[in-house]
Image: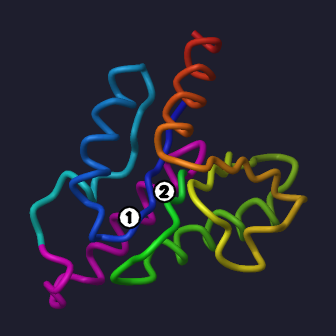
Amino acid sequence: MKLYLAAGFSRQHEMRELAYKLRQSGIVVTSTWHDHTESDTDTPHFARYAERDLNELDGSDGIALFNGPSTNGGRHVEFGFVLAWNWFHWPHHKYDIHIIGALENVFQYLESMEIIQHATVADFLESITKTQASAD
């Protein structure tokens, strides 16, 4: 399983730790934004960061969207990318969609997208590692 982690940049440290735990369980984490040291205010490089993130998302099988307070809206764009891909490429290719936390907008209620909701990060980690273990 290859998974992209989408969260507000303010959660970078938390996502770095989660990525480590996921990798330990055999999950390939395609996102790397949480491993970099650049600042979310480094505007001259924003286009490069966006291209990197979308390429990493494109190389995944699914997205884990961490809802909650955020300093920017990038995670919503990444979620939108996955929705659009699933919408236009169904049934030939489908990203798995995991949402951690409360649903925040109407698109997160689309039943046709088969969104898997998790109440907490701990619930998500337990569920995804069990899924990975059963796939091995």
Does 122 sit above or below residue 79?
above
Q: Which residues are magenta?
A: 39-63
Q: Mark 2 belongs to which amino acid?
A: Leu
Q: Is residue 33 above or below residue 70?
A: above
Any mark on residue 57, and which?
2
Q: Identify the image quadrant of the C terminus.
A: top right
Categorize mark 2 by other alpha carbons within 10 Å: few (<14), some (14-19), many (20+).
many
User: Is 64 on the left or on the right of 9, as rendered?
Assistant: right
| Residue at the (25%, 56%) spot, across then down | 34
Instruction: Identify the secondary structure beneath mark 2.
Output: helix
Q: Where does residue 54 sit, x and y in percent of width and height? A: 45, 65
Q: Is residue 98 left or right of residue 71?
A: right
Q: Quadrant location of the N terminus?
A: top right
* Badge 1 vs badge 2, beta-carbon distance below 8 Å: yes
In this picture, residue 49 sits left or right of residue 118: left
Q: Position of residue 48 (x, y in %)?
A: 26, 76
The amino acid beneath tag 1 is Asp
Residue 22 in the figure: left or right of residue 81: left
Reply above or below: 120 against 29: below
Any magenta on residue 36?
A: no
Q: Residue at x 44, y 52 (%)?
A: 5
What residue is disc 1 on?
53
> Spatial distance from mark 1 to mark 2, Cα to Cα?
6 Å
Of residues 38 and 118, the one drawn nearer to the viewer in this rendering: 118
Tell me the quarter of the picture where residue 128 sits.
top right
Residue reaching furthest bottom? Answer: 43
Residue 108's x, y, as percent?
73, 68
